[in-house]
């Protein structure tokens, strides 16, 4: 088994999944000419971003089943979780790079959108209260993005591994 995946295949599949997700984000950014972290995502490329980890987990588990001795359900679930976690880490690194280097005005745009939403809602009218609310959402933006990325990618990895395990384990 002298292939690219012969040593630590799960790490390599996780890295490929994360890099494909980043590539998808870059394509989304350059094809729509809009900041993907500001506003709503309505592009088909957003759906592809959810499908990439699914496909990579299925391919990884199938590869591992053919090339190693995987018997237990836990041995099949573990690669899905690892791939999901690695995908999240790479995506988080890209997000931080994007927000602070590629498009450094992202947080300011985020603040302005939140300020406009608060004013339009009419619930908060005092300028100091609006500024405090905007600062609170700004402080939660990066941690929220990190936690959401980890949670969604682990969930996708787990769910895909469970479904794949049902089919692969019985063969």
Image (cartoon, rainbow, N blue to C red):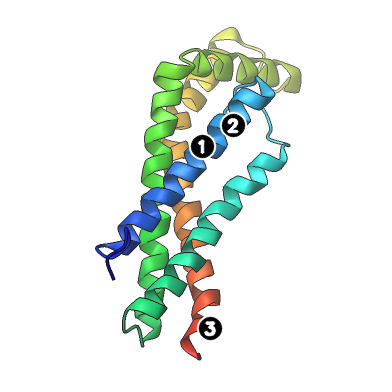
**Disc 1 packing (10 Å; few <14; some 14–19; many ≥20):** some
Q: Which mark is residue 82?
A: none
Lower position in the chain sequence, tag 3 or tag 1 = 1
Residue behind mark 2: 27
Residue behind mark 1: 23
**Disc 3 packing (10 Å; few <14; some 14–19; many ≥20):** few
Residue 38 in view, yes or no: no
**Relative horizontal placement of residue 158, taking residue 111 as reference (left or right):** left
Viewer-side residue, 30 vs 7: 7
Q: Hey, which quadrant is residue 71 in on the image?
A: bottom left
Residue behind mark 3: 166
* Mark 3 → mark 2, Cα distance in angstroms: 34 Å
**Relative horizontal placement of residue 67, taking residue 35 as reference (left or right):** left
Viewer-side residue, 10 vs 150: 10
* Mark 2 → mark 1, Cα distance in angstroms: 6 Å
Image marks 2 and 1: residues in contact by CB distance under 8 Å:
yes
Tell me which residue sits at (59%, 31%) in the image: 27
Image marks 3 and 1: residues in contact by CB distance under 8 Å:
no
Locate residue 91, reporting x and y percent: 43, 40
Residue 45 in view, yes or no: yes
Tell me which residue sits at (37%, 67%) in the image: 79
Locate residue 46, reporting x and y percent: 64, 41
Q: Residue furthest front?
A: 2
Q: Depth-wise, is mark 3 or mark 2 nearer the camera?
A: 2
């Amino acid at each position: 088994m002298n292939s690219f995946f012969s040593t630590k295949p799960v790490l390599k599949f996780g890295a490929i999944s994360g890099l494909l997700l980043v590539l998808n984000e870059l394509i989304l950014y350059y094809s729509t000419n809009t900041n993907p972290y500001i506003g709503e995502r309505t592009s088909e490329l957003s759906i592809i971003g959810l499908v990439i980890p699914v496909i990579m987990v299925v391919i990884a588990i199938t590869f591992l089943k053919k090339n190693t001795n995987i018997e237990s359900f836990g041995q099949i679930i573990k690669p899905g979780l690892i791939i999901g976690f690695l995908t999240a880490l790479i995506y988080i690194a890209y997000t931080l790079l994007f927000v602070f280097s590629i498009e450094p005005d992202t947080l300011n745009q985020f603040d302005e959108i939140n300020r406009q939403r608060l004013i339009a809602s009419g619930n908060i009218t005092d300028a100091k209260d609006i500024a405090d609310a905007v600062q609170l959402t700004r402080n939660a933006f990066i941690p929220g993005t990190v936690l959401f990325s980890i949670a969604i990618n682990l969930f996708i990895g787990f769910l895909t591994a469970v479904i794949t395990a049902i089919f692969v384990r019985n063969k």
